[in-house]
Amino acid sequence: MAPQHPRVVVIGAGFGGMYAARALDSASVRITVVDRHNHHLFQPMLYQVAGAALNPSDIATPIRRTLRGEAHTEVVLADVASVDAAAKAVRMVDGSSIDYDYCIIATGIETSYYGNDEAWAPLAPGLKTLDDALDIRQRVLLAFEQAERETDVARRHAHLTFVVVGGGPTGVEMAAIIAELRRYTLARDFRHIDPREATVMLLEGGPRILPSYPEELSAKAKEKLRGLGVEVRENMLVSDIKRGCVQAAGWTIPTHTVVWAAGMRGSPLLKTLDTPLDRMGRANVEPDCTIPGHPEVFVIGDAAHFEDPVQGILPGVAPTAMQMGRYVARVIAGDLRGKPRTPFKYFDKGQLAVIGRGQAVAAIWKLKFSGFVAWLIWAFVHIAFLIGFRNRILVMLQWAWSYFNYERGARLITGTEEFPVQAAEREVRG
Amino acid sequence: MAPQHPRVVVIGAGFGGMYAARALDSASVRITVVDRHNHHLFQPMLYQVAGAALNPSDIATPIRRTLRGEAHTEVVLADVASVDAAAKAVRMVDGSSIDYDYCIIATGIETSYYGNDEAWAPLAPGLKTLDDALDIRQRVLLAFEQAERETDVARRHAHLTFVVVGGGPTGVEMAAIIAELRRYTLARDFRHIDPREATVMLLEGGPRILPSYPEELSAKAKEKLRGLGVEVRENMLVSDIKRGCVQAAGWTIPTHTVVWAAGMRGSPLLKTLDTPLDRMGRANVEPDCTIPGHPEVFVIGDAAHFEDPVQGILPGVAPTAMQMGRYVARVIAGDLRGKPRTPFKYFDKGQLAVIGRGQAVAAIWKLKFSGFVAWLIWAFVHIAFLIGFRNRILVMLQWAWSYFNYERGARLITGTEEFPVQAAEREVRG
């Protein structure tokens, strides 16, 4: 590889970044993939880690392993502080920097609490990283342990109340998996409480859950959630989250376990770019996924606000990121051969949300599916996309196993330096 | 279950506690199992989690799930502060307490640094809990990441030096698994370093590794470790561990990754008992595993110092704990039927230590095995004992998989709130 080949720096090894890097490796470029984690995360199944159904390593693969075969690609574990578009350099938090000829920003989105980050974030974790998922798993499992030891009826009930905020696909999936955990997996494991009595609430601020889906499927999803004993409440915009309770639309709901699946915003790195952002903090990109005035800086995936003339604003889902990643690789390879750029075309593969064991809703082109058929589509699509053969087999096995007996493989409470119940109590009561 | 049945409190759900509880359930007693973790840990394979070969949940099962079928047993997740033998009560850190008729203390041992706990523990984690294992896994994987980014040759070499202190079975297993990780799993994953060049040292204070094994097997083990490129150094008593180096027998070894497998001491809970302890802080027990003057208080497993008239001091291994657990259950059931107690008899099943892929040493009765045969014995024995069918299948699959291609399934760096490299750097550089 000649050193004069242009350098492409890819920031973020999510779906967008990984697909861009892999597609670029055959071009005459040197590629550097920078990420703050050492693993690529299969985010659509992250809720299964939070629900104690899968292990972290079932849905995460080391970036180095995935890119091992790409001879022109190096991987750097580092935290990016800023992108200096004028100097064409990526600056790290540790002071080092990498110059680029092309930069692909694929840093995704992060959890946002409508301006209440400081107060709400410690009480209501979001679900974006593996650590988030392990945090939620720990809180949910500890809540049952605390209820088992609590003799006061009201306090016990608060421990057995789980509130999921936000009725998008993540919220629906989280509510369903907690509902199944309490109804099946934990049902017979306690002596003083009946986990099946636990309350699982899904609070949606708007008039219906899954607002981006056809109305018919929102209704189906609600029906399926009710079948699992989830209390679905629409028009319940959360006004406050405090230690021990959630407030929404006049209600005060005593609970110690809140999962936040309501707000998202673009990665803060985009603010260092001096380029127009949308209301959510995502970069407004041109038809070729670049930012205005910088044809060498691409923003792709969830971090991009892309307005398609026909399809409107593209949804922040994995297929968008993957397609953009491959598209940007083609654009760069084309540039080097002097080919003119053509605009990005999004191929809509539809939407899918899972509602527990063997139930899902799907809107694919003009077709709508619900129930077991939709679940089979979901399972097939997700297994097909899981990167790495080994993960595929193990995940399939674990699914098959838990499908037949509702056992959960990953019911471990770990990761606290001090004794977990006390830590949780200080958190909750303190 | 009549409430007047005697209550047995079991403290600790390791091998001793779990075997006692399960064997007791058929007797006319009420059983309470107290543990500070929600899972039983298959400790003999903990080094595989530290070496990124297995997932935490592959070697840990929820205590509640394992004891679900035992109708007279309840499980309490709590941290025990003291055992009040005079009042026959177990006191928790949170102020609550449980009265008992019989108490079985099975709290095991913990890592000890010969009086240097405060200075050495943050620099050289031991290997007793899942969190320990994840900590070591993170340090080892981050060391390679830091070496990849380090341009100074000496500093890079320090990042690529791994020191395991203590040549007992745990130290031997840890050194071998790190050696394999660097030689096979990570070999082709970096661009600026060759992980195969990493130094793995095993420091033993005495004249030979595996001191409790026959000399012949110590020599075999050393030969096998050398085959993996491990530098085995005997008579190297560690005198100091500082940020960035280990000192032993006049040597100063620059390293950022130290694993401590050298010292152990009895659980501090035993000190609250007002009973004689041995040098290691284990309780000296009577032939029926009780403490002097308290026929209702048993100490079993690693926490017990049991001197057998023929076999000497019993080794702190899983079979000792399991046999004591079952024995104590029989004693209590016998008491209730007015049967006199007979002393505990230990059935020696031999010793086994693994040295990487397909290699082990074993001393069973008068027989000595080494190499692949010993490894097969090890694999068979350990799978047979893994509690829970599901774990058995998954662990076997993962072994089979990694046996054929050296991939490691659990190469994830997680669990740091802040960016891991920075955290590690602050840790290392001070």
Image: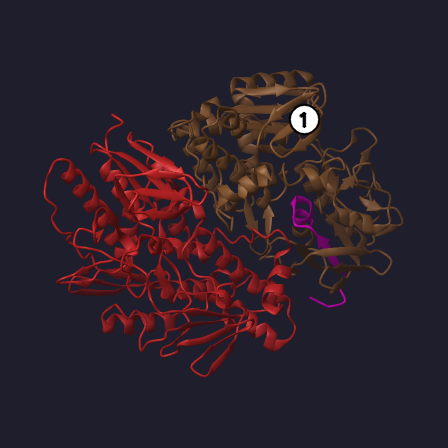
Chain colours: A red, B brown
Among the 4 quarters of the image, the one containing residue A31? top left
Up the image or down, A97 lies above or below B25; here it is above
Question: Which of the pair B323/A158 is nearer the observer?
Answer: A158
Measured along the vertical axis of the image, is residue A213 above or below residue B75? below
Q: From which residue to which does the magenta span run?
A: B1-20
Q: Is any atom of residue B73 visible in this view?
A: yes
Could you tell me the amino acid type at mark 1?
Gln
- Does A18 lie within the magenta span? no
Q: What quarter of the picture does the C terminus of chain A occupy?
A: bottom right
User: Which residue is depicted at the point 49% across and 67% down?
Assistant: A120
Q: Residue B12 in magenta?
A: yes
- Residue B406 placed where, x, y %? 42, 30
Residue B23 x %, y %: 67, 50
Q: Residue at x 84, y 48 (%)?
A: B340
Viewport quadrant of the N terminus of chain A:
top left
Chain of the residue that carries numbered disc 1 in the rendered image? B
The residue sitting at 36% across, 55% down in the picture is: A267
Left-right relation of A294 to B29: left
Q: Which residue is mark 1?
A: B247
Question: Of B66 and A121, which appears nearest the observer?
Answer: A121
In front: A339, or B66? Answer: A339
